[in-house]
Amino acid sequence: DQQVKQNSPSLSVQEGRISILNCDYTNSMFDYFLWYKKYPAEGPTFLISISSIKDKNEDGRFTVFLNKSAKHLSLHIVPSQPGDSAVYFCAAAVYGQNFVFGPGTRLSVLP
Amino acid sequence: EAGVAQSPRYKIIEKRQSVAFWCNPISGHATLYWYQQILGQGPKLLIQFQNNGVVDDSQLPKDRFSAERLKGVDSTLKIQPAKLEDSAVYLCASSPYPTWAGELFFGEGSRLTVL
């Protein structure tokens, strides 16, 4: 039973345009969310986080939106750059418990 | 600051053989995790240590997997005997934060192929 879903295995975007990566979750108790980026042959690296008390968090070109009623979060990358090409994982946690990761979305930013 | 170190990077074994992976976390990080990432899936937690004590090993297949973190620093994960379905990348991560509260710092992973 997947508690964290990323229904798009892959996404292609033109350089300079917006990339939108989506994540859905089933456990309404999740109250902390992270996005990780992973390049081939490397470990995942932290990108951005959001807690359930907020609906938006911004860090440079990266913005995460949280819709608790829909149990949905999204990562926006504006503008997209070729170096953003990677696999993006969404992860969620309940206070005091470990993170559950989604299966990832592979983003390709085309020059 | 040195990152999380893992070895070996790649390992190919036959089923029923044994294998061990090593991890050295970032200095000062009390919490250490082992994750299994099967191709096309997200990382799945196998075991979590806080210093040298086990906090969560609920998803560790204890009939074949074992892990230890002696002296609360580096850690080893062992699989014996290996099965075909154990083919995966084994990621070690560490964190200075409590369980849920912050980012994890991952190593590059150890890719295991079981033939």
Image: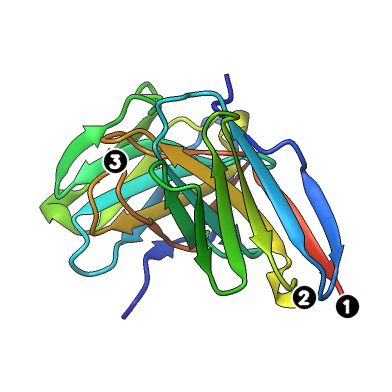
> In the rendering, at what x and y percent does residue A109 appear?
81, 68
Label 2: few (<14), some (14–19) or many (≥20) C-alpha neighbours in 10 Å: some
User: Dividing the picture into quarters, in which one does residue A67 lie?
Assistant: top right
Q: Amino acid at mark 3?
A: Gln
Q: Is residue A109 left or right of residue B86?
A: right
Q: Residue furthest bottom?
A: B1
Q: Residue at x 38, y 28 (%)?
A: B60
> In the rendering, at what x and y percent does residue B77 appear?
35, 44
**Distance (Cα) linking label 3 and label 2:** 35 Å
Whether residue B68 is visible, yes or no, is no
Up/down of B85 relative to A61, above or below: above
Q: Residue at x 67, y 59 (%)?
A: A76
**Distance (Cα) linking label 1 and label 2:** 6 Å
Observer-nearest of B88 and A4: A4
Q: Residue at x 18, y 66 (%)?
A: B28
Up/down of A32 relative to A71, above or below: below
Asked if the residues shown at circle 1 and circle 3 are in contact, with their CB atoms under 8 angstroms apart, the answer is: no
The chain letter for the residue carrying disc 3 is B
**Distance (Cα) linking label 1 and label 3:** 41 Å
Residue at numbered disc 2 = A82
Q: Secondary structure at mark 2?
A: helix
Q: Amino acid at mark 1?
A: Pro
Residue at numbered disc 1 = A111
Q: Which mark is residue B48?
A: 3
Q: Residue at x 55, y 29 (%)?
A: A69
Label 3: few (<14), some (14–19) or many (≥20) C-alpha neighbours in 10 Å: many
Asked if the residues shown at circle 1 and circle 2 are in contact, with their CB atoms under 8 angstroms apart, the answer is: yes
Q: Amino acid at mark 2?
A: Pro
